[in-house]
Image (cartoon, rainbow, N blue to C red):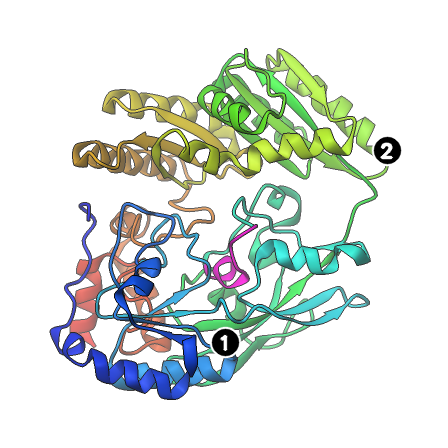
């Protein structure tokens, strides 16, 4: 483990492990309960792989009713619960504790209903993000949020972290495409929140649940907004001499009132690594690139790309290449979508997730470089430039504790710089454990205590994903006050 602290496990729970597992087996039969060490090891970490803890047990229910029974049982036993989708969290959101039971939704992956007339779709939340669009593509529809991990990540995790993706610039993030959920409370109550209409009556509890990082309960089903596919779409690739020039071009496109489907950014390090992996035809002589995609009728696409090209050239673009075939478009996006995996072939890295006003992009890119240079670390910048959601990858050596400590410190400085210019600590990855102790940089103590009061209303015993989001010291104070 690195320097990010986790609570000490409760020895009273550890002593009752066999009893707790036996109780879970009465609720979820067969292979739905995992308790051997070898099998539990697959759940000891998520995509923030620098941190690992072996869970007490793992349970994989198959229905909402089983989830409700499991939560009610564990709540009664006073056992912490770690909700888990596919474990793709880059902020440690699914990191377990030794005295906690992981409750996963991977066995709940069915499409329950498709209503093309009302443009809605009901799914169990263990279905993958890409699986949703795959189930309706033959009808000419798609689900808009598209995180880079969409091949693996689940709707459960998307709802927990309010995930976005490359196309969120035009279509919004999960909260803009989520209409209703089946929500299971810690007491085992099954509650319907929202519905199949765009504006459900009553308090906007759906807005509270989406992005809550598994702090309040578990979402087992979701009603999603689906959209008709556009008549056509076309990406264009621009090369720039520097990251600052690409950042300035991004701000200029947005400032001109142009709304592409996506604007994605890569710097020189990322270009080299991704091109070596995907062979997408990226400009190897560029210091940075932008992938800009627009959609609509052919004439509309041509008009938008012409305007964007003028802005790009005015901000120093040195090359431009439009995709002319579906294969070329797929290659351009393959390079971007596989960027994190391609980077993993080269080095260990911590993927940050700050968000800033787009007008401050050139300044922040320069500061990211300065911060990492001062730490003696390399950084690769790959992110959703259009909505200011940065994903700098700070490269380090996992086998060297000093290197990891430097990477964590550099990551903290990057996030603090984002907050300083009017941004926030996270755009879509969540706070998890990674940014937990930085929350005091963005919120006052009074604001954090108010947020923790909301958690206490849903989870009075603080058993649901308890070591995440809120600074441990403030968390302890809240528990004492309760």
Q: Earlier in the sequence, mark 1 or mark 2?
A: 1
Q: Residue at x 77, y 29 (%)?
A: 304
Q: Residues within 10 Å of mark 1 (few under 14, many from 20)?
A: many
Residue 104 found in image quarter = bottom left
Q: Examine the residues drawn in magenta and state their main secondary structure.
A: helix
Q: Are marks 1 and 2 in contact (CB under 8 Å)?
A: no
Mark 1 — residue?
Answer: 183
Residue 37 found in image quarter = bottom left
Mark 2 — residue?
Answer: 298
Residue 364 position within the rendered picture, expressed as x and y whole percent measured from the top left: 41, 27
Q: Is residue 451 above or below residue 196?
A: above
Q: Is residue 28 left or right of residue 92?
A: right
Q: In this rendered view, identify the residue nearer to me: 42 or 209.
A: 42
What are the residue bounds of the magenta stretch?
151-160
Q: Residue at x 36, y 40 (%)?
A: 419
User: Could you say whether the residue bearing mark 1 is in a helix, strand or loop?
Assistant: strand
């Amino acid at each position: 483990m690195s320097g990010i602290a986790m609570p000490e496990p409760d020895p009273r729970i550890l002593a009752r492990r066999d009893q707790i597992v036996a109780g879970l087996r009465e609720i979820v039969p067969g292979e739905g309960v995992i308790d051997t060490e070898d099998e539990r090891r697959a759940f000891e970490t998520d995509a923030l792989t620098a941190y690992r803890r072996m869970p007490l047990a793992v349970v994989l229910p198959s229905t909402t009713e089983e989830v409700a029974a499991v939560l009610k049982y564990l709540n009664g036993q006073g056992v912490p619960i770690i909700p888990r989708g596919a474990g793709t969290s880059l902020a440690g959101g699914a990191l377990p504790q030794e005295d906690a039971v992981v409750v996963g939704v991977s066995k709940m992956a069915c499409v329950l209903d498709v209503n093309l007339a009302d443009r809605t779709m009901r799914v169990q939340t263990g279905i993958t993000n890409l699986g949703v669009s795959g189930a309706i593509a033959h009808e000419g529809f798609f689900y808009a949020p598209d995180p880079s991990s969409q091949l693996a990540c689940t709707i459960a995790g998307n709802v927990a972290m309010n995930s976005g993706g490359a196309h969120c610039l035009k279509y919004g993030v999960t909260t803009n495409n989520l209409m209703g959920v089946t929500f299971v409370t810690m007491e085992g109550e099954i509650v319907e929140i929202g519905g199949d209409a765009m504006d459900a009556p009553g308090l906007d509890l759906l807005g509270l649940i989406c992005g809550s990082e598994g702090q309040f309960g578990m979402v087992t089903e979701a009603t999603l907004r689906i959209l008709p596919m556009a008549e056509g779409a076309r990406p264009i690739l621009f090369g720039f001499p520097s990251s600052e020039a690409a950042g300035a071009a991004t701000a200029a496109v947005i400032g001109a009132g142009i709304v592409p489907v996506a604007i994605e950014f890569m710097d020189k390090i990322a270009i080299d690594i991704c091109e070596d992996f995907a062979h997408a035809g990226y400009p190897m002589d560029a210091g940075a690139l932008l992938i800009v995609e627009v959609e609509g009728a052919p004439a509309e696409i041509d008009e938008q790309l012409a305007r964007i090209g003028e802005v790009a050239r005015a901000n120093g673009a040195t090359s431009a290449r439009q995709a002319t075939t579906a294969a070329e478009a797929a290659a351009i996006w393959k390079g971007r979508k596989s960027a994190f995996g391609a980077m993993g072939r080269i080095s260990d890295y911590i993927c940050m997730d700050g968000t800033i006003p787009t007008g401050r992009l050139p300044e922040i890119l320069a500061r990211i470089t300065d911060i990492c240079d001062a730490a003696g670390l390399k950084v690769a910048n790959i992110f959703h430039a259009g909505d200011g959601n940065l994903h700098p990858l700070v490269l380090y050596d996992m086998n060297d504790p000093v290197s990891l400590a430097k990477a964590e410190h550099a990551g903290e400085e990057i996030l603090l710089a984002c907050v300083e210019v009017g941004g926030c600590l996270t755009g879509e990855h969540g706070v998890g454990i990674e940014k937990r102790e930085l929350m005091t940089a963005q919120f006052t103590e009074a604001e954090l205590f108010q947020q923790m009061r909301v958690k206490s209303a849903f989870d009075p015993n603080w058993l649901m994903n308890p070591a995440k989001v809120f600074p441990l010291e403030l968390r302890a104070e809240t528990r004492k006050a309760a």
